[in-house]
Image (cartoon, rainbow, N blue to C red):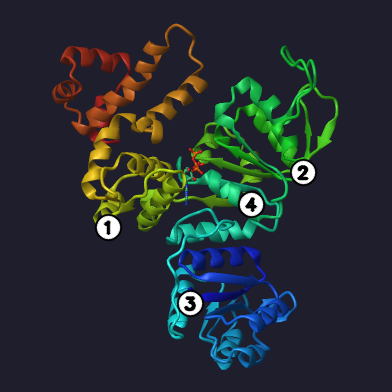
Amino acid sequence: MTARILLVEDDEAIALIVKTMLEDSGYAVAHTASVAGRDALLKDETFAVMVTDIRLTDGDGLSDIDRVRGMQPDLPIIVVSAQNSLDTAIRASEHGVFEYFPKPFDIDELGKAVEQAARSRGTSPSVSESSDGNLPLIGRSAPMQQVYRMITRVLRNDLSVLITGESGTGKELVAEAIHQFGNRKSGPFIAVNCAAIPHDLIESELFGHERGAFTGAVAQAIGKFEQANGGTLFLDEIGDMPADAQTRLLRALQSSRIRRVGGRHDVAVDARVIAATNRDLGSLIETGQFREDLFYRLNVIPIHLPALRERREDIGTLARHFLSLAEKEGLPRRQIAPAAVELLEEMEWRGNVRELRNLMFRLAVTAREDVVDQGTIRELRVASAPSRASDADNGFDTLIAQWLRDAKPSGGNIHRDLLREFEKPLIERILVQTEGNQVQAARLLGINRNTLRKKLSELAIDVGRLASGR
Ligand SMILES: Nc1ncnc2c1ncn2[C@@H]1O[C@H](COP(=O)(O)OP(=O)(O)OP(=O)(O)O)[C@@H](O)[C@H]1O
């Protein structure tokens, strides 16, 4: 029989994390936020373990533990508490609790303690899928736990959040989770990708415009800021926002009011702003491309998402999660062999979770066997290599997009100009590699030595400096 756990916790965010962890481990969880709720549940049902907070909405979860004992004498009790004093620890031990976890605690440690306690009563978790309404983020590694901790800190307030991390690490998912489990869940969640909107349209897209504000503005339009009223505005790729829009955004954040393009009056807006970027805003500030004051305004609570290669222990769980998602979407059911997971754990994952997700879906479609083994993954990696750029940005794509935007090259010579941009750093890199040896560099590059010499002077490359590594 599936072990049922009673969770008594009034901090919704912590309850969510603990519940998700327990359900993922195969337990059924009954959750209540109060002492009264706890007593009602204990009257009706026998539980394998109780996990309880101390300070609850209507009382102290520890002081009347005797009443719990009266109702279910053998129930192991695990206490989690933010009252991290020695006194609390002593009280917990005096009440004979199974284990005491001061907050913040390691969720895996709590999981282990619950399992031990459940086993002590001869019950165990069943192997079940996590249910809906749980935290949509997969992964229990230490860096992800830090992410969860940060998420819980922003659910009950409207502080600005800046999510950083490489492309495909789950930034949008985190923004959605903050919305979905936060105070504003009944309002809209509006996502805007600042890099995808042409520069001259971004202000009108975000702030709306009045009729006749510019050629083509044939009617009044409500911008994303106003659409997000009462909810959350997610500004993805904030580092790509042009200067004028940055100024307008800063003003909106400071005053909670916006002015539509071409408008005469301000309009009050109440939207929580969550921004995200995979670029280094620090260096954009240094080069004058990003306003420092806006950065501080957005970065009240920073949440950094680790690259997948920094949390390899989550790769197996994620891979299985995506195979089961694929199955839910009607693709064949697949499992993955432990050796195949080991291979996945060794990979580079420049496209992070997105790349893993795509690989798993492709495997679900193309694998010949039901159990995916190492060989299948190797084959698929080779077969899919040419299309990798679309799944996992290989870097060039972003660079080119950035260059086209920033350098605003005059039409007609883009090919020549871009090649020239690439040529200098390429030659420099090769010269560093050959420690300044031009013969070797020319050979590696596949160009004539004289051509190389000509390029060195044309591009003002200082070979001596490169050779000495200065
Ligand atoms: N921890 C996770 N658990 C489950 N799925 C995840 C997780 N992280 C990312 N994903 C999935 O990976 C894909 C990419 O995630 P997402 O779009 O949130 O990344 P991102 O960091 O916003 O990327 P970009 O910077 O390119 O916009 C999505 O399909 C998302 O559902």
Determine which residue is flagged by label 2: 270
Disc 2 + disc 4, Cβ < 8 Å: no
Q: What residue does disc 1 label?
A: 338
Quickly name the residue at label 3: 114
Q: Residues within 10 Å of mark 1 (few under 14, many from 20)?
A: few
Q: Nearer the viewer, mark 2 or mark 3?
A: 3
Q: Secondary structure at mark 2?
A: loop
Task: Answer with left or right where residue 130 lies relative to residue 234.
Answer: left
The reply, left or right, for residue 9 in relation to residue 284 is: right
Q: Amino acid at mark 1?
A: Pro
Amino acid type at circle 4 is Gln
| Amino acid type, callout 3 | Val
Image quadrant where one finds the C terminus = top left
Q: Which of disc 2 and disc 1 is earlier in sequence?
A: 2
Q: Is residue 403 above or below residue 272?
A: above
> Secondary structure beneath disc 3?
helix
Residue 383 position, x and y percent, is: 26, 33
Let me know if residue 197 appears in the view: yes
Tag 2–tag 3 contact (CB < 8 Å): no
Comes first in the chain, label 3 or label 1: 3
Instruction: Write down the residue under mark 4.
Output: 180
Tell whether 410 sits left or right of 188. Answer: left
**Disc 4/disc 1 C-alpha distance (Å):** 34 Å
Residue 58 x %, y %: 75, 78
Q: From the top left corner, tell me how far across and down residue 190 is, in percent.
A: 66, 39
Q: Which comes sooner in the sequence, label 4 or label 1?
A: 4
| Separation of residues labelled 3 and 1 (CA atoms) | 26 Å
> What's the amino acid at mark 2?
Asp
- At horizontal 39% and vertical 40% (from top left) the residue drawn is 358
Residue 312, located in which quarter of the rendered image? bottom left
Where is 213 relative to 466, above or below? above
Residue at 59 percent of width and 51 percent of height: 177
